[in-house]
Image: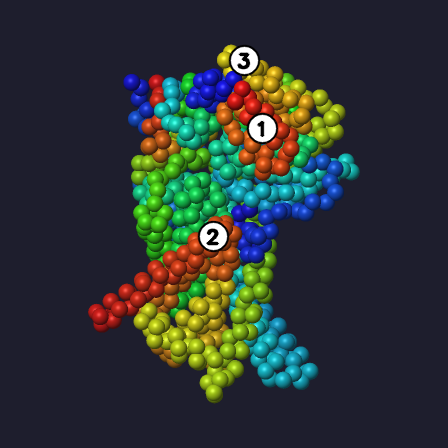
Amino acid sequence: MNAENFKLQNDLRDRIVSTLYFEAETIADKVIKERGKKSNWESKLDNILTSPSWGYLTMLLLLGVIFWITIAGANYPSELLANLFFIIEDKLLAILTAIHAPDWVTGLLVLGLFRTLAWVVSVMLPPMAIFFPMFTLLEDLGYLPRVAFNLDYLFKKCGTHGKQALSMCMGFGCNAAGVISCRIIDSPRERLIAILTNNFVPCNGRFPTLILISSLFLAGVFGSLGVTLVVLAVVLIGIAATLGVSYFLSKTFLKGIPSTFTLELPPFRKPQVGQVVVRSIFDRTIFVLGRAVMVAAPAGLLIWLMANLQVNGVSILSLTANFLDPFARSLGLDGIILMAFILGLPANEIVIPLIFMGYLATGSLIELTGLNEIRQLLITKHGWTWLTAINVMLFSLLHYPCGTTLLTIFKETKSRKWTVLAFVIPTVVGLTVCFLLTQIVGLLNL
Amino acid sequence: MFLSLADTPVGQERHVESLSATGIMRRRLLDLGFVPGAPVSVVRKAPLGDPTAYLIRGAIIALRKEEAAFIQVK
Amino acid sequence: MGLSHRSTGVTVFKEEGAKRRGTDYIVALAGNPNTGKSTVFNALTGLNQHTGNWPGKTVLRAEGYYKHQGQEYLLIDLPGTYSLFANSVEEQVARDFICFGNYQVIIVVVDATCLERNLNLALQVLEMTSKVVICVNLLDEAKRKGIKIDLSALSEELGVPVVGTNAREGVGLEQLKTAVKKVASGSIAAEPRKITYDLEIESAISDLLTKIETNSFTHINPRWLALRLLEGEDLLQLGKEAKNPVVTEHNKTKVALLEG
């Protein structure tokens, strides 16, 4: 008896599934007492959200609104947190003085470690605690598959899958989470492309960088709205980079035909607002505090050491910065900025504090309380121009993934090669873009 | 010659006649409920024209043009 | 998993959820994507795995515990799948677990607003094992749309216990736990609906069944096994991964069959 003798192979599955559905229909007919009406408002809403005229507009608007609420809403809590930390810092200093701790200990602990931690928490926590709950609500509502539905055409043209839009959205929150969410893409080739390009959307850790720099240079023009528009613009560049690099990858290293789409669009569900918001805020607080302790504090420590340890009368900080400076200048940055990005590999949120501390050259964040002081430091003392600001933002958008994300990529791909590529590809893009921009601007004498 | 789902205009309802897909694609379509005889209606198209959302077995499933072309309807 | 602190940072490496303690019963949770399966999971275990409203959310296999009438249950949330034919990795994971996993009950979560398609999966599960509880979830959604389902009629049709729930609001969960307990302890003798295929398939199945050692199986239905063999499935590979001697033995039979 041979399986082929049955001649069942080819349409056996068809017959099995047909029978199953026939049974399912039979049962459903007996058991469903009322079939109900189609819900009209849901259909109407969906028509709007995916229409040629409104679909893209609503996506953009929604993204803009979320960013705006995050940016505007974070100001007051950030101030409160900063004040709280100042109080704690005073107490710490008092204790250290009382026990006659040596200067270097005070420097190390308070000026290096604590200050950085304080800065990161007060700048990072409020935006995250606002953005994540909002995004989660949107997720719960069921809006995200509509985004995939709207954007699939673009992703298909780039040789990948519409679900990449979803992992891209996850990347706004955290790129490591975005990488994991790439599992929803069935085709290994397309999944890999999604993983490799996830870093092109700025995660929450990079928001403060973007917000701060655009705040500085917009000088109060249009206020939070202006900042929001800049962030939105940067994000759009990131999305463009995602599509562009995906296209490139699917034509070169990761060649292949597009797979199938088949996405289910679930009905809209009313999110459980209270629960989601509370859980999300609580969750984000833990995350930010955890990262601040594990990454920001040690980074602050490190840079304090670099600033205060000297080799032949020159601090390690200066040595490093000077070494990097020529290369950095070609990118429209400077040695300190580049060093901050390099040291910021473990976590994106420490880049700005590292820049500040580098500039202050004492390895500590001394009384940088307001935008004006920061402007003084960056623009007046260290020659930042609008070009520098743009390059910093661009490089922040287009550079290697943070340590956590790289670890996650390695775990997901189980491949050293792809993890290295995940590091190299965005970095090369970023370096190229900044370099070209700087050179062109220089040539045109802008 | 039957028309495919891809050629069916928005708002119309049809019944699945057969599937011309093979392999994994065929199996996935079958699992979603696109078996011969099943009613399916065309709900809406995406802003750029593709993919299209279909109502099948009480759920809305979006398919690309190439995929919907595999489903013959009457 | 979603945007929780557990989903990022070093904790992503810890894929296993709760550690296994001495549990009384192991319960698996299966169902189509987007049936609120993870909401059921959360509601039962009290774990706060984030559940988003888009298909394919359960990308990690979640495990959690709940206590009921003094006994401890380990709940394993399987990936949401449209079927158990192993078309994708997720389906394979779910299917392998249902086939070879060590559990006493499997809850199949079904979307009340989309019954036919969900029954496809439920029926497939019923072909594999009789230790099933059907959980008809999203009753609030169904009510909103004006859909009414006769749950006891459904139970009669399927031959296994059926419980209606609205997991978000916590409705029906106690009944669910009770039904699970009844099935796990064997106080309910389930008689799952038998699916009859067309004549040619049925005769092929009965032919195969005479050649298979039916008493060497634990809880896998021989009919299901026969069907998979007819489809040409390589159960040998599965058996290796599951380290299940039953399946290895069975595959020797298959090889003999195909050569005979």
Residue C203, which numbered label?
3
Please, is residue A92 above or below residue C249 in the view? below
Near-viewer residue (A150 or A55): A150
Q: Is residue A72 visible?
A: no
Q: How busy is the neighbourhood of tag 1: few (under 14 within 10 Å), some, or many (20 plus)? A: many
* Foreground pick, A122 / A309: A309
Q: Quadrant of residue C49?
A: top right
Which residue is labeled 1 in the image?
C251
Same chain under badges 2 and 1? The reply is no
Chain name for mark 2: A
- What residue is rendered at 35% in x and 39% in y? A258
Task: Give the residue at mark 2.
Answer: A415
Circle 1 SS class: helix
Q: Nearer the viewer, mark 1 or mark 3?
A: 1
Instruction: Say whether marks 1 and 3 touch (CB < 8 Å).
Output: no
| Picture residue at 34% right of the left edge, 59% below the top | A429
Mark before the other along the chain sequence, 1 or 3? 3
Q: Is residue A92 left or right of residue B48?
A: right
Where residue A268 sits: x, y (%)?
Answer: 48, 37
Q: Is residue A299 in view from this perspective?
A: yes
Mark 3 belongs to which amino acid? Ser
Depth check, mark 2 against mark 1: the one in front is 1
Q: Which element carries disc 3, helix, strand or loop?
A: helix
